[in-house]
Amino acid sequence: PRLKCVVNDPENITGPNRLVLLSEKFLDPSGADLPEPLRKKLEEESALPLVLHNVHLDYSYFTAEYVLKELLPAGMEVPGSFETIGHIAHLNLRDEVLPYKALVGRVILDKNSPRIQTVLNKVGTIENTFRVPEFEVLAGRASLETEVRQHGAIFKLDFGLVYWNSRLEKEHERLVTKYLTPTGTPLESGVSSTPSLVVCDMMAGIGPFAISAARAGCRVYANDLNPNSTKYLAINAKANKVASQVDVFTMDARGFVRHLLGGKATSGVEGVISHPNAPVMFSHVVMNLPATAVEFLDVFKGMFCSSAWSEATLPVIHCYLFARTAETSEDIVKRAEGHLGGRIGEPEVHLVRDVAPNKHMYCLSFKLLPEVAFATSMNNKNSSLKEDHSENASDAKRLKTSE
């Protein structure tokens, strides 16, 4: 219980005397059950008598964990932690707890109000192209439109329509600070007015990487297939005063890269036209779709025009992916090379977080080599945009993750 150890004397509230509360296990008025050093001290201080004091503990005194432990069946694991997204508490309740989900939601709301106003539980696994889970509201108001702040940036979103994971906050900071800011300038330092690097964010979501990179001074071309995500991406760019540095697209990821590269990347591809400034000389590519991003690496093979890029540096690619515990860094690089269709230059494999006991999220960063970028033979899989959309349909079946 969250009690004050020193309280007013109830027999004389306004008087000078105070009560020092001891543990409830010491109930003998004579002090016989007290530890010997304390008992001797009290005997020496005759002005410090022992008295019985009643303490009334109501619901407000106890933590959510304590209350749930008392109310749930004995032996049941108490849901103690949750992800916070603005005013929303996001739970992943175990099956055994589901019969008590309303109780759990009510207690968590009571104990975390007013900071938390809505308590959600994820229903099932992520099985759709847009990476958006299904939720049920356990307690509180139904609105899922909220606002999150990270490293001085504001992100507005509707948690029921777009993907967001607050556990990736440190990774957002790591990637942008290490690769996309001059001399590792902290993200909290504010918006830079001197754009330097150009970033291609293929699966941008609502902009956790794109907005942070723009605030660090980058020019960003940000894309997502989910129109709700790009709606909030544009809102966030404006809210963070970087709208002039962020171009927003709602396209298939492969079509988006071809659009920026132009030239032979769009030649003969139905539905894809070149960007007015093509080829866009981007220096970094972010692929934040760990369930399937590695499969999109094939879009880079043979898509770059050697004459146009003769004096430009080929991009560094940051591809997020899942891997099992048994897989080594070498295994991850080999898998990526298989999808890329060529060698990877200067790979760096970074462990982002543990997703499940045998499942981990990694970021593979590497330099795109000329032998891959300027390859004369392209993967047949990339021959048409129509094939891209059919692949997205199959991707939806593969997007089953406990994240």
Image (cartoon, rainbow, N blue to C red):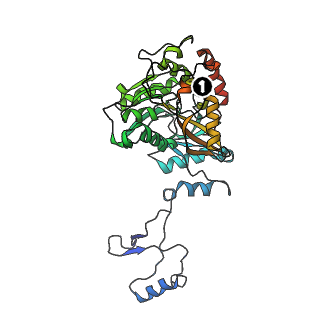
Q: Nearer the viewer, residue 30 or 196?
A: 196
**Counting other residues with Cα less than 10 Å from the Cα at mark 1, is it few (<14), some (14-19), or many (20 or more)?**
many
Q: Residue furthest bottom?
A: 44
Using the image, determine if residue 137 lies above or below residue 18: above
Q: Is residue 33 visible?
A: yes
Q: Secondary structure at mark 1?
A: helix
Position of 260 with respect to 320 (left or right) is left
Task: Please state, as top left, top right, bottom left or bottom right, where the C terminus lies in the image.
Answer: top right
The percent coordinates of residue 123 (x first, y second) are 63, 37
Q: Nearer the viewer, residue 394 or 282?
A: 282
The percent coordinates of residue 216 (x first, y second) are 37, 36
**Location of mark 1 (residue):** 298
Count of marks placed on residues: 1
Using the image, determine if residue 25 lies above or below residue 238: below
Q: Nearer the viewer, residue 188 or 230?
A: 188
The percent coordinates of residue 17 (x first, y second) are 35, 76
Residue at 50% across, 51% down:
111
Q: Nearer the viewer, residue 215 or 278?
A: 278
Amino acid at circle 1: Asp
Q: Is residue 123 visible?
A: no
Residue at 66% across, 24% down:
394
Position of 200 with respect to 356 (left or right) is left
In the picture, residue 179 is in which quadrant? top left
Residue at 68% across, 44% down:
95
Position of 117 with respect to 75 (left or right) is left
The percent coordinates of residue 178 (x first, y second) are 44, 41
